[in-house]
Amino acid sequence: EAAIPKMLAPCLLRKAVLTVPLVFVVALLLMKPVRSDQEVGTAIPAESRPCVDCHAFEFMQRALQDLKKTAYNLDTRTETLLLQVEKRNLCDCVTANLLN
């Protein structure tokens, strides 16, 4: 009697391993697909919503302004660094001439 449950356990396990994914797949196939045109929540009339193109245009304007600010900051920083290098070179040159 003890040998029968030991042999039965792998068989039941194998059936469970095959049955669970099968039930999952069947459940997925039987589910009603969600359509992409379904809206969630309260619907806002189209007349009161700004168009997608307007949002994209505003976003691109802000991004362009940010890029211009960044470019200006980089230019200013580059000029400052170049002036520091020129000043350092000039100081080194003057110091070298004074020592000679």
Image (cartoon, grey):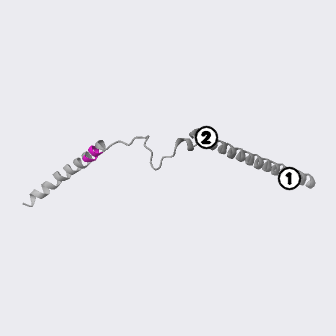
Mark 2 neighbour density, 10 Å: few (under 14) some (14–19) many (20 or more): few
**How far from the left and from the top, in percent, is residue 75?**
76, 45
Q: For the N terminus, which image quadrant? A: bottom left
Per the image, the residue denoted by label 2 is 54
The residue at the far top in this view is: 53
Does residue 47 appear to the left or right of 27 in the view shown? right
The residue at the far left in this view is: 1
**How far from the left and from the top, in percent, is residue 85?**
81, 50
For the point 35% across and 42% down, the residue is 33
Q: What residue type is labelled 1?
A: Asp
Query: Which quadrant of the structure image shows residue 31?
Result: top left
For the point 22% across and 47% down, the residue is 18
Task: Give the secondary structure at mark 1.
Answer: helix
Per the image, the residue denoted by label 1 is 92
Mark 2 vs mark 1, CA separation in Å: 57 Å
Does residue 51 appear to the left or right of 90 in the view shown? left
| Residue stretch in magenta | 23-27
- Magenta span: predominant SS is helix
For the point 9% across and 61% down, the residue is 2
Mark 1 neighbour density, 10 Å: few (under 14) some (14–19) many (20 or more): few
Does the segment drawn in magenta span residue 52? no
Q: What residue type is labelled 2?
A: Cys
Q: Nearer the viewer, residue 39 or 65?
A: 39
Does residue 35 appear to the left or right of 8 in the view shown? right
Q: Mark 1 and mark 2 in contact (Cβ < 8 Å)? A: no
